[in-house]
Image (cartoon, helix red, strand yellow):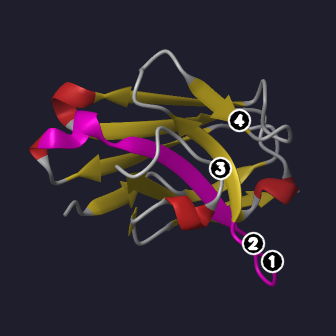
Amino acid sequence: QVQLVESGGGLVQAGGSLRLSCAATRRSFGSYAMGWFRQAPGKEREFVAAFGWSPGNTYYADSVKGRFTISRDNAKNTVYLQMNSLKHEHTAVYYCAATMRYYSGSYPSQYDYWGQGAQVTVSS
């Protein structure tokens, strides 16, 4: 089992940047496929970005391509989400997630472990 702890959320003006971090407690972190999701008030949890088992493979929702970048540091057991050129519609609680059942995934049901969430608020 792995525990995930997000940090780095906060309030930022439109056009600004934030970097979210997700620290995992398990040393075999590199064996997990990792992803980021978000959930805005009154909406379903939606896919943002994900890694597969191969560090070179990354996937993004169309709405964040070119703005957000997912990266990982296996030595630090940490995954990052760099968010640039933020818009008000990016306001949501952002969650990192991990799975060993799938190579990668864009559906919440594919992930077994979730962090507590980090609030990102973008003022317009």
- Which quadrant of the structure image shows residue 69? top right
Q: Helix or strand or loop: what does disc 1 sit on?
A: loop
Q: Are marks 1 and 4 in contact (CB under 8 Å)?
A: no
Which quadrant: the C terminus? bottom right
As drawn, 115 above or below 33: below
Task: Work out which residue is located at the far front of the displayed protein and give it.
Answer: 101
Q: Which marked residue is nearer to the observer: mark 3 or mark 2?
A: 3
- The residue type indicated by label 2 comes to Ala
Taking the magenta stretch, the answer to whether it contains residue 101 is: no
Does any portion of residue 78 appear in the rendered image? yes
As drawn, 107 above or below 56: below
Query: Which residue is tagged 4?
Result: 60
Task: Work out which residue is located at the far top of the displayed protein and give it.
Answer: 56
Q: Helix or strand or loop: what does disc 2 sit on?
A: loop
Q: CA–CA distance between discs 3 and 2?
A: 17 Å
Q: Which marked residue is nearer to the observer: mark 2 or mark 1?
A: 1
Q: Are marks 4 and 3 in contact (CB under 8 Å)?
A: no
Label for residue 40?
2
Magenta span of residues: 28-45
